[in-house]
Amino acid sequence: MRTDPKLYLAVDNCFATKRWTRPAEWMDLLREFGVYVAEASADNEFDPLYMDVSYMADWLIEAKREGERTGVRIGNIFSGHGTYTTLGLAHTDKRNRDRFLNEWLKPMSAFAAQAGAGLGFYCHAFPDSILQSPQDYAEAELDLYARLAELAIHCRELGIEASGVEQMYTPHQIPWTIEGSKKLLREVYRRSQAPFYLTLDTGHQSGQRKFIRPGREQMRLAASRKTRTGGAHGIWLGPKSADLLFQEMSAQPKSERERYLNLIEEEMDRYPHLFARPTDGDTYLWLKELGCYSPIVHLQQTNGASSSHLPFTEEENAKGIIFGEPLLRAIADSYHRAETDGMPPKCRELYLTLEVFSGTSEINSDILYKIRESVRYWRKFIPHDGIALSDALRNLPEVDGKGASLG
């Protein structure tokens, strides 16, 4: 059983989008920051949906040449916002699902293989019409698993050791719960017998608590509030059918409401895919359960209420909840857990990858400051690339009560 993976500190070049777009430019910046592993985002001028095929080939040649010059290598290639903003691989039209698999994911897999890199992505979503039909949802879910399994086989044949999908945080973008993520990994591995993994993001636990199934007392109070104010009830009931019953209940005298509560709960029972558990909003629990199946961990600072892709500056760390020591300990816990039947092999390498976004009107020097300070913080926990997790834990810097480095 693998218990001691190698760790690498990487930076997603999305911070450089529309500013430093040539590999030579962002590789020079990474080298200045003391980072020698990049995650190449499709958003930074490397997307087969938008780019010329010969240009993409030339981009790879340039990236290899500049990598040799700077010492910066591409550890992973990752999808960007272009594919994130569509139904993509779960589109209601099969022609579009086929196109995303055959004309985006498979070409990107080939590019990743040529670059000697892994592949991570997120390019699917279920529309509300699918979510509102348990049968349609089940069929769409199985279709997605089949396509991911086909991709996993394709990546294995290309020699890619680690490919995987990113976890999200809302019902229409699976996997978004811990148990749902385990189900996806098992299903894809069962169908493909090829390694396929998750990308965990430290800010993607900010939405799940909005979708926790309410209890009866919570619904009673919400109904009274709605009757009194006429406004929104402020709780998640899942399917439209449950919401309509709630609207009817709110107009009834209290003596009639218990009957409606029974009907609402029966409706919610039919839609388990629309609800999360409180634990699904815990970043460190995700890492404890699934860190060993996440070859890429996207690092962003967050207060737990939003996924804003903030940097690890002193200012943001003072308000944040993501810190080096508890993160590494959570990952170590995942590696020391017993092997689980049906899951892919535990990862031998983990790329802890800073994914810090830059604003359209943000000043260039401020962007670079955010990346530089974030790298400085995480180098205290990953002092050199390829360090064993056990060694990183033995050499932890002194931290304060929240787990922030004092050094």
Image: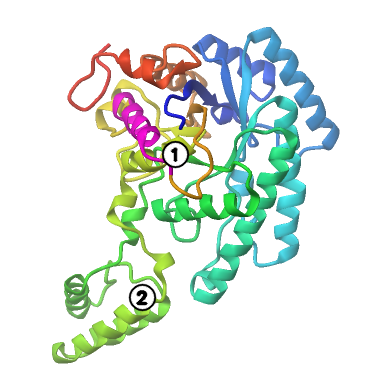
Q: Residues within 10 Å of mark 1 (few under 14, many from 20)?
A: many
Q: Is residue 22 magenta?
A: no
Q: Which amino acid, by three-letter code, is at mark 2?
A: Asp
Of 17 and 386, which appears nearest the observer?
Answer: 386
Q: Residues within 10 Å of mark 2 (few under 14, many from 20)?
A: some
Q: Is residue 293 visible?
A: yes
Of 184 and 10, which appears nearest the observer?
Answer: 184
Q: Quadrant of the C terminus?
A: top left
Say which quarter of the image contains residue 137. bottom right
Residue 193: percent from left, percent from top: 63, 47
In three-dimensional space, the C-alpha distance between marks 1 and 2, rounded to whole angstroms, equals 29 Å
For the point 48% across and 53% down, the residue is 175
- Relative side of 275 to 185, left or right: left
Secondary-structure class at tag 1: strand
Earlier-in-chain disc, 1 versus 2: 1
Q: Main secondary structure of the magenta part?
A: helix
- Relative side of 113 to 1, left or right: right
Of the numbered discs in the image, which one, if any, rests on residue 269? 2
Q: Which amino acid, by three-letter code, is at mark 1?
A: Asp
For the point 21% across and 28% down, the residue is 402
Q: Is residue 133 visible?
A: no
Of the numbered discs in the image, which one, if any, rests on residue 98? none
Of the numbered discs in the image, which one, if any, rests on residue 201? 1
The span picked out in magenta is 324-339
Residue 97: percent from left, percent from top: 70, 59
Q: Residue furthest right?
A: 54
Q: Which mark's residue is nearer the viewer, 1 or 2?
A: 2
